Image (cartoon, rainbow, N blue to C red):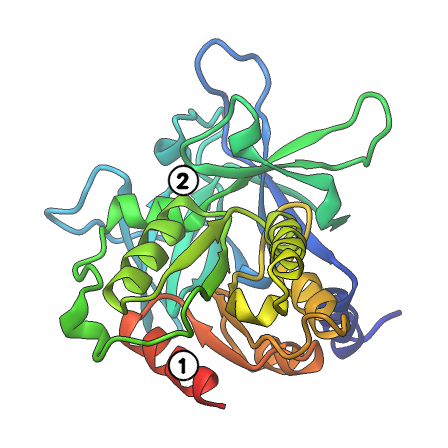
Amino acid sequence: MKTVQQEVDERTNLTGTNKFELLLFRLGVSGNAERAELFGINVFKVREILAMPEVTAIAGTTPHIMGVVNLRGQIIQVINLPAVVGCTPKSGLNILLITEYARTTQAFAVESVEEIVRLDWSDVLSAEASAVGGSVTSIARIDGNTDGTRLAQVLDVEQILSELSPPVDVPDAGTVGPKIALAEGAVILAADDSGVARSLIEAGLTAMGVPFIMTKSGKEAWEKLQALTVAAGKEGKAVSDKVALVLTDLEMPEMDGFTLTRNIKQDARFKSIPVVIHSSLSGTTNEGHVKSVGADAYVAKFNAEELAETLRKVLRH
């Protein structure tokens, strides 16, 4: 029987293999559907799973906020996840998922929890390439490429939290400090699969006065880097003359940020290009993995001032 530490070590080691673990749960039915579809969230975001405790209602909250719970002295906001995505639970809200996301702790009420599955990011497809959108960032093929594959909708937690509590401060020149100067013709290549995150990053980089190219996945960023290498070669330049820095999220369909970073740092053409990982998966474990794949820095989402400070520091080296 595995010890808890062995399970933790095994799970964290997945970050070096383009694999991750997805917690599957159900929220009920939507519309005229007869079956409750599967939803998922990265296990790294889940701190605890509880049977539904007593929730204290708070006056003046939005309809999707059930109230708060007192968990060992910490007051945590409870979000009615089925209501957010338009589902109706058949058996009520029975489970509470305590999550840590972008420096905050929140609780999501769900109908039931199914299982934890181990997947390769190549089995996760961007929702923007399908008919699904809104609160879903990607679609996971649970059983690989076999016929009759089960599908799970991976929730865009950034989108959900932004809708429930919109950012108070939009990045501007006053918050990010002095402009950041890049070499003429150079850009920052950024990758993030969340529409909300991309909007904030774009606003932040614009406020910093930095030209950039935004992509929606690690795979797209990797392909763009190849294309820029070809373009640089035709001009008699190195790709580092075109790309000053790569800024990447960790959780992305098809290729995660760890794999993108490792690919860049192991390729002689790109290894001089600094990589900054910008993720909602905060914590010392992930910061340790960031160093192991060769990233130059890690900054937790989302604080435009901290992001600007990190970019300046890395670009000076």
Q: CA distance from mark 2 to mark 1?
A: 34 Å
Image vertical order of residue 263 relative to residue 202, above or below:
below
How many numbered marks are there? 2
As helix, strand or loop, the secondary structure at mark 2 comes to helix
Instruction: Give the residue displayed 46% in from the left and 19% down from the top.
Output: 30
Amino acid beneath label 2: Leu
Dot 1 corresponds to which residue?
A: 310
* Most foreground residue, 152 or 68: 152
Q: Residue at x 70, y 76 (%)?
A: 293
- Residue matched to label 2: 81
Do the CB atoms of the residues marked 2 and 1 lie less than 8 Å apart?
no
Q: Position of residue 42 (x, y in %)?
A: 59, 54
Instruction: Give the residue at the far bottom of this rendering.
Output: 317
Determine if residue 46 is in view. Answer: no
Mark 1: amino acid = Thr
The image quadrant of residue 235 is bottom right
